[in-house]
Amino acid sequence: MECIYRIGYSRDNVETFNIFDHFHFLEGCAKAAKEKEITKEQFAERLKSELLYYYWYKYEWEILISCLLSRDDEKSRKVDVREQIMINFDHFLDYVWNNRSELIKQYNAKKREMNKLIR
C-alpha cells in the first residue's frame, strides 16, 4: 500500500510506515470504498478528509527535511503525512480506487484480528 516516512521514536530513526496500518484511517477509507454509488471524485474527497483528520499537522506524524549541505535550521521544513501523500495524490487515488476490494479485505481482516484480542 502507501508508505510514508516517519520518525521511529523507539529507535530514534527515520522509517517507512504504511498509512493503512493505522486502523481508524483504514476503517474510514474502507467505509467509503463500501459505498455502492460513490463516484471516484466523491471517493477522492473522502480520502482527503480521512488524511486531514488522522495525519494533518500532528506532531507524531511530522518529519523535518533539511539540506545536508546547509547548517541553517531556518531552511528546514516540517512535512506531515498528508503533504507526503498529496505530492502524488492522483496516483495514490488511482491505486486505492482500483484496489477498493483489497482495502475492504484488509480492513475486515484487521477488524477480526482486533476482535480476537478483545475477547
Image: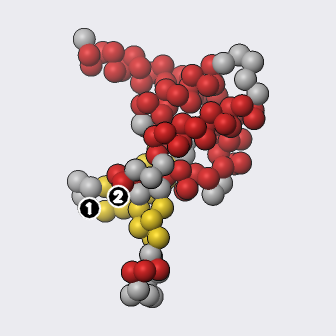
Q: Secondary structure at mark 2?
A: strand
Give the residue at mark 2. Answer: 7
Give the residue at mark 1. Answer: 12
Q: Nearer the viewer, residue 76 or 112?
A: 76
Q: Residues within 10 Å of mark 1 (few under 14, many from 20)?
A: few
Classify residue 40 by image quadrant: top right
- Residue furthest to the top in view is 119
Q: Is residue 2 visible?
A: yes
Q: Earlier in the sequence, mark 1 or mark 2?
A: 2
**Protein image colouring:** secondary structure
Q: Nearer the viewer, residue 51 or 108?
A: 51
Number of callouts in the render?
2
Name the amino acid type tagged 1.
Asp
Q: Quadrant of the N terminus?
A: top right
Location of residue 82 in the rendering, given as x and y in whole percent from the top left corner: 53, 50
In the image, is residue 12 above or below residue 119? Answer: below
Q: Is residue 99 visible?
A: no
Name the amino acid type tagged 2.
Ile
Contact check, label 1 and label 2, Cβ < 8 Å: yes
Q: Which residue occupies 26% across, 55% down? A: 9
Q: Quadrant of the C terminus?
A: top left
Q: Secondary structure at mark 1?
A: loop
Location of residue 113 in the rendering, given as x and y in whole percent from the top left corner: 36, 20
Classify residue 21 by image quadrant: top left
Left or right placement of residue 52 versus residue 34 in this view: left
Left or right placement of residue 114 versus residue 95 in this view: left
